[in-house]
Amino acid sequence: MYLSVRVDTEKCIGCKICITSCPEPNVFIFLPEQKLVEVNESRCKACGLCTTVCAKEALKIG
Amino acid sequence: MSKKIITPVASLAHILPEDYRALVEKGPHGKSVGIKDLGSFKEITEEHPHCAGCGVSLGVRLALAALPAPEDTLVVGTPGCSFFALSQTAVNYSNTAFGNQNSVASGLKRMLSIRYPDKDKDVVVMAGDGGIADIGLDMTLHSWFRGEKISTIMLDNEVYGNTGGQESGMSPEGQVLHMAPKGKNFKKIPVFEMARTAGCVYGAKVTIASPKRLGMAVNRAILLARELGPTYVQIYTPCPTNMKFSPADTLRIAKEAGKAHYAFEEFMTEEAALRIAAMEGGLEKEPE
Ligand code: SF4
Ligand code: SF4
Ligand code: SF4
């Protein structure tokens, strides 16, 4: 199984900080209605950068 | 690339890859979207072969999102890690012989001004420190001396990343690298200061850890180059693979550099300052 970042939808507040930390294009998708981010797991390289900027600890590599 | 060119005829749309269709339907062409809107539009760059956690690919991604008019932009690059993502980008792109980028960009800009006298066509050089500060330094400087209306963006990872970690003119003094086993024994080339002396009307030094500032700098540089003359943005884009730190540490390294040798700096001519004030409704408070 490939590693990818996963979003904990209980913890994410949709602040969008993670989106500008990711070196990969079109991985994060912002869902304005739910105020959440979604991840295209097949594009993520599991570098972990986004997990270092999320203040809510909503992102985990797994 | 205008939206018209990429829009497929209706009867063929269904056979196109999903990414292509997404670009047509949700791309940034003709809209005023920028870094703050990332995640809400289809980015013009796509899956690329940069290493995980690469600072250069983040720099490219952010700079591309900050283009004021991607449909009327021509990006000129040169070999090195910087072009891995650029060659996967839906923007008119030209690669060049190593170091030639500012000469090629000068010619293309002049040609576009003749061909489209009533339209702004932005010519933007995006290349690494090797291409700009070492191999192409003479051509970079001469494009600035000549006052060419192009923007030059350096993705500075302070190393030759693509060839395995050799010393670059932009590596900091003392850094141990291939071909510098005892540490580099001269200073980082002051390209930022040289840009001011050589005639750039605007310059900025920024790291990938400050995306809003990066966007502001790229935006200002491109809009000012349209009317006034050459502009320069130097972006710190650390390389985990060759500097041997964990890919998850790239932003921490960039933040630390932002507090040390890569503190945010801008210079601009008086005319550029007036133009920015007019464009942005007064010199705003700098974003974080
Ligand atoms: S940084 Fe964390 S809280 Fe903010 S949008 Fe991303 S995952 Fe959600
Ligand atoms: S782990 Fe890396 S590649 Fe994956 S979403 Fe986070 S920043 Fe992007
Ligand atoms: S070698 Fe360094 S600069 Fe090149 S793609 Fe890998 S991490 Fe990025």
Image: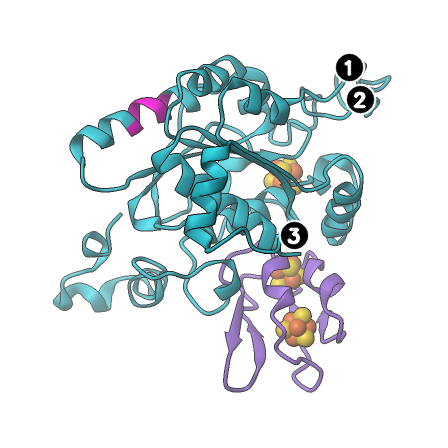
Chain colours: A purple, B cyan
Q: Write the residue at 62% across / 56% down.
A: B287
Amino acid type of disc 3? Ser
Judge whether residue A1 can be spotted in this image. Answer: no
Question: Mark 3–mark 1 contact, CB under 8 Å?
Answer: no
- Residues indicated by labels 3 and 1 sit on the same polypeptide chain: yes
Considering the image in quadrants, where does the C terminus of chain B appear? bottom right
For marks 3 and 1, give the one nearer the viewer. Answer: 3
Same chain for marks 2 and 1? yes
Q: Residue at x 19, y 56 (%)?
A: B4
Q: Which residue is drawn at 46% across and 58% down?
A: B34
Specify the principal SS of the magenta part.
helix
**Vertical comparison of B192 with B275: above or below:** above
Q: Is label 1's Cβ within 8 Å of ligand 3?
A: no
Query: On the picture, is B169 further left or further right than B221?
Result: right
Q: Mark 2 points at which residue?
A: B173
In the rendered structure, the residue with mark 1 lies on which chain? B
**Mark 1 neighbour density, 10 Å: few (under 14) some (14–19) many (20 or more):** few
Percent from the top left, x then y, of residue B70?
35, 49
Q: Give the image quadrant in which the ligand numbered 2 is located.
A: bottom right
x, y percentage for residue B189? 67, 20
State the count of labels: 3
Q: Mark 3 or mark 2: which comes first in sequence? A: 2
What mark, if any, has residue B210 been given in the picture? Answer: 3
Decide: marks 3, 2 in contact (CB < 8 A)?
A: no
Give me the disc on residue B221: none
**Tags 3 and 2 both on a single chain:** yes
Q: Name the residue under label 1.
A: B186
The range drawn in magenta is B104-109
